Amino acid sequence: MKKYAVIAALITSASVYADPIYLKCSISSEETDEHHQNIEVRLDESNGKVSHSTDALVFNADGIWSAEAIRYKYMDGTGGPLVPILIQAFKIDRSTLKMTKTITIEYPKKFNTPDDLLGPYSGDCTIVETAENKI
């Protein structure tokens, strides 16, 4: 019985752990080809985490993994009675490495203003081969 428990533990731990994947992505507005943005992404599926970095914004997020895509988002704003909430939603297609981004601005109900949807923005990602780190 002990032998089966050890085998099950080895199989489970081996299948759960995977090295993070690093991507470099380049996106711009689909409508005007403006607002070009370079994005570095670290995908850690075994922990469900995504790290996102640009010149202007760095954040960590929980990722949602499916067979087709990886999704994550960034929210800015408190959602108080006078403060709009900015939501940036990202999707990376697992087979094509195409990234899409939409931005939603949710206004407080008090203003009776419909939410704004900006974008979509899209582009491609490439996998970055990493050297063995020294630190």
Image (cartoon, rainbow, N blue to C red):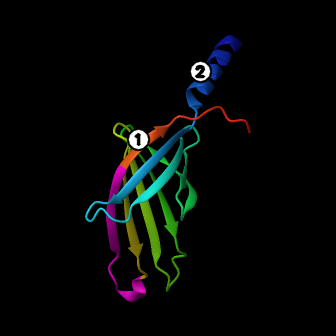
Image quadrant for the N terminus?
Answer: top right
Q: Secondary structure at mark 2?
A: helix
Percent x, y of residue 122? 33, 55
Q: Name the residue at 71% across, 14% down.
A: 2
Q: CA distance from mark 2 to mark 1?
A: 22 Å
Image quadrant for the C terminus?
Answer: top right
Looking at the image, residue 67 lies above or below residue 121 = above
Q: Name the residue at 50% across, 66% down.
A: 75
Q: Residues within 10 Å of mark 2 (few under 14, many from 20)?
A: few
Percent x, y of residue 128? 50, 38
Looking at the image, residue 103 lies above or below residue 45 = below
Q: Name the residue at 64% across, 20% down.
A: 10
The stretch in magenta equals: 109-123
Percent x, y of residue 35? 38, 65
Q: Which residue is mark 1?
A: 66
Q: Name the residue at 56% across, 26% down.
A: 15
Q: Residues within 10 Å of mark 1 (few under 14, many from 20)?
A: few
Q: Which residue is mark 2?
A: 11
Q: Is residue 128 left or right of residue 124?
A: right
Q: Residue 87 falls in which quadrant of the image?
A: bottom left
Q: Nearer the viewer, residue 128 or 45?
A: 128
Q: Amino acid at mark 1?
A: Ser
